[in-house]
Amino acid sequence: MKKLLSSLSRNIRLLTKKTPQRKYLVIIGALVIALFALAYSYQEVKLFNDFLVEKLDEKLGPHKVTKRNDCFHIPSGAERPVFVNREDEIKATDLVWTEEFNKLPVAAKKLIRKQVPQGIEDYDINVAFFDLNNDGVDEVFVNNRSMGGSGGQGFLILENQKGKWKQIALFTGSFIMINRWVPEGYDGYHVIVYWFRGGAADTDQVVMAYKNHEYKDYSVTPVPLNVLYSNDFQKMILDLNWMCWDSWN
């Protein structure tokens, strides 16, 4: 026992000294830790992907990928949403979406058609109205299946600026609008937050605020894996993208 303790003591003293052996042991230890972390992340991703499939099956039945994806037709809120309290949030699916593209001014329709291919019928272009800056004049929100993809749903926002229509936002990823905060130096329009998936587990949270007559990215924050694959976050994403598994997965 004394010999064993003596040997352990010598080895510990060697590790505390700055020797080539210590350098290699530190490198090997770091690699082992990294491998364990990757293995844990992989298992976490697999578990929560299984969770998503289960939730999709609960709502839509067993999932089958089809050529025509009806989930690209955005659900519509029952009535026009309004902010009442500072903490209120309004989701994309809370807006009242209609097929009133043909009722828009010609100039607005031309801007929309720059982003929507000519092969898309007018009645497939979803339009909603919401006053983003509380001036009594609505901005126009546009959604169509051709504007989205694996990164999420696609949206376009138009504003009438002194009699001329202008595109003020174009982004991929379903969104919420918030009422409680506007960044310093930006105009008093409601802030828009959306989540864009770049691929695999690469997902960003983007905060947009209005400045110089259009929405600009105020911040872009990668969503950490432990948040991305948490139950609450995935439920929110599936809800915001109206369970559109084909496009999100």
Image (tube, grey):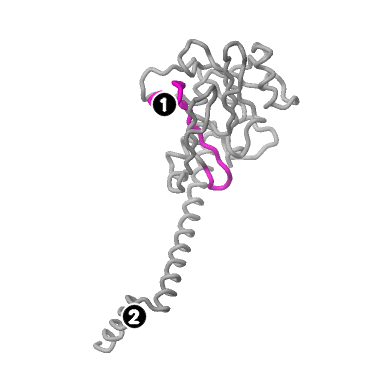
Q: Nearer the viewer, residue 139 or 214?
A: 214
Residue 185 inside the magenta-drawn segment: yes
Residues packed near mark 1 inside 10 Å, few (<14), some (14 to 19) or many (20 plus): some
Residue 223 inside the magenta-drawn segment: no
Magenta region: which residues? 177-203
User: Which residue is at a point 57% across and 26% down the rendered structure image?
Assistant: 169
Give whichever of discs 1 and 2 has the lower sequence position. Answer: 2
**Quadrant where the N terminus is found in the figure:** bottom left
Dot 2 corresponds to which residue?
Answer: 14
User: Which residue is at a point 31% across and 78% down the rendered structure image?
Assistant: 12
Q: Position of residue 132 (x, y in %)?
A: 49, 19
Q: Distance from label 1 to label 2 (Cα)? A: 57 Å
Residues packed near mark 2 inside 10 Å, few (<14), some (14 to 19) or many (20 plus): few
Q: Position of residue 136 (x, y in %)?
A: 48, 10
Farthest-out residue, right: 119
Q: Position of residue 14 (x, y in %)?
A: 34, 80
Q: Position of residue 154 (x, y in %)?
A: 60, 30
Q: Quadrant of residue 28?
A: bottom left
Dot 1 corresponds to which residue?
Answer: 182
Q: Quadrant of residue 11?
A: bottom left
**Left or right placement of residue 53 versus residue 190 in this view:** right
